[in-house]
Every structure is written in structure tokens, then in C-alpha cells.
């Protein structure tokens, strides 16, 4: 059946040759910010939906998958994550998950577009409910510049929670940026970046792995997890460490975590690290 | 953007409030069989596509996920799977994976609609290339009746590779059918059934778990895996055993398997068994 624009929001994924649609009730908001086009919809079954430049960013219903997997695996891999930097992440969902960790003393978020955060506060209040935590620092500006100005060995975990590697986020997938991250990370520091679909963006994932190694990261691993509203319904985050193997996560702390999750636990953490055969072969030139 | 019917095949998922579309080049075939409406398309990026009653059954590009996860976890959980029964599975992709296991002496497939298999042979020849294996038995008829007529303790692994639990496949989700399966399974026997989306069909999954336990299965576990062309892009299979805990799979045999896979390996097997928090809570009434 043909889908009309009045009742559906549709995102076409050209590289996948696919499209994904959500049934909508109404458009709640639309604007052109200084950086991008932002729209908010009320959907029939996924709660609210944020769209940037025509690409689905998040919905109420399934953002837990992405936000939990962008934060908890990295934080539970680091032995004692005290200083966290989030690049992008303007909807504040990753920040909220990061601040659930009692070890975190400071979480700075550097989002380029303040309007994303203002709209999240208005339309997705559950995502921003940790913004007034005294450990949180909300900054609006260039994340690459922020890392460049950071002191050596000053950050324990860097989370790159960006849009796709086109437009404003392109520089976040460069070796030069990775080198600055490696420099700014402390001993044992963990870097993690959203890294697109394992099925559609296998080549990009290879480039991310190679770029991180070229920038001096010693160990690089991708996490795989479901994300229904993103192209292919399957997404990844790529984790890296400069000075040693990434190693095992803190299993006991994960099992005794003092907060609730909807997807994340020790099993799904380890499961996300299990590379499918085709992915493993692709990274090894097979 | 609106998607036209000339260039896209679109499946609407009412319970999800979502739709998934594949860009198509042409419709290759269409017919009303004795049981259902079957259509075959050539897509732009997913190879060929089979659609039954408007629901996507499989594509060339991503069927490996479903077929590998419907077969290898069950077969590597059973200590010595010699006699395998597949209910449904008319495209023969699951049968092909089953026959990769050298321990299998006999694999019977009971599909209700012979046209599905004939069309698979014509349009998806890579899926049917094991059909002339002398261990394979292709039967066309009622799978429920086949199990009812099977002797006690005569089957090692039963794989229910069916369409959704509406229409012809409805009886395959009944306690009465599960009881017959439990009776027909040998000691150590493993049952596995496709069990829909973990996100959209959480209640159905609970009913499947309860139904299997009511029918006498002692242990029931669901496997979760990506499946881009199915609703939510995330799918499940549910495995059960009558006489003991399901237990660990044969890790050494998995690692030394004498065939190639695209998704399946020991890591993805164990990862698929890791239940997301919300799923675990749902099954436990949380």
C-alpha cells in the first residue's frame, strides 16, 4: 500500500534501498535552527518523535536501546569513570544514563545546537530530567574544539553521540579528531562512538576501526544492538582504548547496579560484543 | 516523503504503528495458491523478495539471520541431533542450514503449501540447493497432523518455521500442538519456534512461554536476533526442552563447525540468549 504524508512520517534510507515509517497523529513543532531542520511529531504508538534534517533521531518508545548502549558498556568497562565527556547528545538521554553511575563526578555535554536541547526539555522531559544534576555541565558549541582544548589525560570516558557522518558531524569521524580524543583520555580511558548500521554501513565501520587504530587506539571493538527506528533496525557503537586491551567489564558492579535499565544488563552487554561472522570477516578483509 | 506503489513494496505493521518498505525494480510473479497469496519481487538492494498475504517472508540479502538462528542454536544445543522435523519452512532455507550438520541423518520438512517450495526452487535457488540431499524428506501437508501421527520419542529436534500466528499457522501456537511435540520428542529433544518481535509481541511471547510450560516443557528460553525486513527489525525464536534444563550448547563443536555461516557463531548464540531487561521482567510479570 502507498503511504501518505498526512498520516505517516517516512524516512528513506538510500544506501539501504529501504524506508521506515511511523504512523503519526500530528506534527507538534518544526523549525530551521542555525544548524539543521528539526521537527517533532506525536506518533500513534512510539510516543513522540524527533527528526533532524529528515532523519529520525529518537522516539519515546525505543530510545532506551540507543541511550543505554551508548553509555553503560563504556562506563562499566572503565574501572572508575569519574570524568565523562559527551560530544553531541543534545537530547540529553545519554547524559541521563551516564549520571546514573554514582562514580561519575563530572559529565560535560558539548552539543552544537542548543535548540535540540531546548526542544528535548519541552517535548521529551523524561530524557532531560537529570539536567539539573550538579555534576552535569551543559555546553553549546563545537565538540571538536572542546576536545582540542582539553588537557592531556583529563577525561575518563568520551562518548560521541552524534548524527550521521554527513553535515555537522562529519569531523567527528576523522583521524585528527580521534587523535585529540586519545590525547585527552586518561590512562585506562574509554572512547565510544555511535557507528551506524552493521548491515548497511559495514565499510564505514571498517573505516572507523582503521581510523581509531591509526590515531593510536590499541584496541577497538564494536557493540551491536537493536534499534527499530534506525535504518535496518540494527545499530552499533564502537568502543576503543589507547593503552591496553578493552578487557572485561565490571561484572559484579553491573549485576549490583543501583539503577534500573530496560535493555542493558550483563548478558546484553556481552551479547552486544559478539561480532556476527560477516562483520568479523569484513573487519579482517575477508 | 510519500512512497508510491510502483517503486516500493510496503508492509504496514498495525500493532507496531510502523511500516517497512523495500525499493523494487519489478514484480516477478504473483499468484493465489490454495492457501495464500504469494508474490515475488526483484528489489534494488535486497535481491529477491517473497511476500505472503502482504507480509514479507524473506529476501536474498538478510534471510541468513533468520535461517541460521532457527537452526544452529537448537541443533548445537542437542547433544546428537539425528532426526529433525521442520514444520513449515517451505522456502527450504532452514532445511539447508539443518543439513549442514553432519550428525543429522534425516530431516523431514512438512510445508502446507507446495507452491511456496516450488517458487523458492525457481526464484531462490540458493535456499533450495540442499533439497536433493538424500537425508532430506520434503512433504506437503498439515504439520500438526504429521506430529500427531509421529511415534513417541521419535524426533530429536522440532523446528516450527511458520508464518505469523494468524491464518494457516494459528494452530502451531496452541498448547495441544505443543503437547504433541513434547510427546514426539526423544529424551533430550529440543523444540524451537519462530516467536515474532521481542518489542511488538511481548505478550504473545509470554503466551508462548506459558503454553510450552503448560504442555510439559520444563525449560523455555527465547533467542533474540536482528531481522531487518521483519517488523521492528528485531525477531525471536523460542526454544524448549521437556526433560531437563536446556543447558549449554556444544561450544567446541560450534567453534569447529565444518561449514560457514554469516551471522551464527558461539558468541552470537550466547548473545541471542541474553534477555533484555524489559523482556525478562515481562516474562516474570514485572
Image (tube, coloured by chain):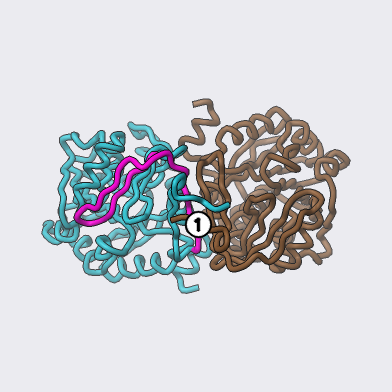
Chain colours: A cyan, B brown
Query: Relative to A212, is A128 above or below?
Result: above
**Residue B253 visible within the image:** no
The foreground one among A22 and A215 is A22
Q: Is residue A212 above or below residue B94?
A: below
Tell me if residue B153 comes above or below residue B135 in the rendering.
above
Left or right of A277, for residue B150: right
Left or right, residue A283 beside residue B224: left
- The location of residue B263, given as percent across then percent down, is 56, 59
Residue A84: x %, y % from top left: 22, 47
- What residue is drawn where x is 74% and y is 60%? B99
Q: Is residue A25 magenta?
A: yes
Check the image and name the residue furthest to the top.
Answer: B285
Q: Position of residue A163 (x, y in %)?
A: 31, 56
Q: Which residue is mark 1?
A: B3
Residue visible at 75% across and 55% down in the picture: B90
Which residues, given as a range, are shown in magenta?
A17-42
Name the image quarter holding the N terminus of chain B. bottom left
- Using the rendered view, name the quadrant where residue B169 is placed: top right
Name the side, left or right, on which B36 lies relative to B237: right
Q: Chain of mark 1?
A: B
Q: Quadrant of residue A217?
A: bottom left
Q: Nearer the viewer, residue B93 or B28?
A: B28
Q: Residue at x 58, y 45 (%)?
A: B236
**Residue positioned 77% across, 31% down in the render:** B176
Amino acid at each position: 500500500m502507498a503511504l501518505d504524508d498526512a498520516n505517516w512520517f517516512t524516512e528513506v534510507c538510500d544506501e539501504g534501498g529501504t524506508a521506515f515509517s511511523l504512523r503519526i497523529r500530528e506534527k507538534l513543532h518544526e523549525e530551521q535552527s542555525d544548524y539543521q531542520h528539526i521537527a517533532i511529531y506525536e506518533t500513534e504508538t512510539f510516543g513522540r518523535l524527533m527528526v533532524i534534517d529528515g532523519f529520525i533521531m529518537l522516539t519515546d518508545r525505543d530510545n532506551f536501546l540507543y541511550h543505554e548502549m551508548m553509555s553503560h558498556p563504556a562506563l562499566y568497562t572503565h574501572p572508575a569513570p569519574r570524568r565523562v565527556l559527551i560530544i553531541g547528545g543534545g537530547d540529553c538521554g545519554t547524559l541521563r544514563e551516564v549520571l546514573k553511575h554514582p562514580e561519575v563526578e563530572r559529565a560535560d555535554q558539548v552539543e552544537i545546537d542548543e535548540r535540540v536541547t531546548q526542544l528535548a526539555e519541552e517535548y521529551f522531559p523524561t530524557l532531560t530530567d537529570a539536567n539539573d544534576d550538579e555534576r552535569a555541565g551543559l555546553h553549546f558549541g563545537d565538540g571538536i574544539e572542546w576536545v582540542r582544548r582539553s588537557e592531556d589525560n583529563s577525561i575518563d570516558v568520551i562518548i560521541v553521540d552524534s548524527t550521521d557522518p554527513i553535515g555537522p558531524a562529519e569531523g567527528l569521524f576523522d583521524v585528527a579528531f580521534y587523535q585529540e580524543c586519545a590525547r585527552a583520555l586518561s590512562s585506562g580511558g574509554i572512547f565510544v562512538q555511535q557507528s551506524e548500521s552493521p548491515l548497511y554501513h559495514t565499510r564505514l565501520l571498517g573505516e572507523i576501526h582503521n581510523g581509531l587504530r591509526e590515531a593510536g587506539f590499541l584496541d577497538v571493538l564494536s557493540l551491536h544492538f537493536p534499534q527499530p527506528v534506525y535504518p535496518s533496525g540494527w545499530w552499533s557503537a564502537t568502543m576503543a582504548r589507547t593503552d591496553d586491551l578493552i578487557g572485561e567489564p565490571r561484572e559484579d558492579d553491573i549485576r549490583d547496579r543501583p539503577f534500573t535499565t530496560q535493555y542493558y544488563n550483563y548478558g546484553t552487554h556481552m551479547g552486544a560484543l559478539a561480532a556476527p561472522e560477516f562483520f568479523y570477516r569484513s573487519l579482517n578483509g575477508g
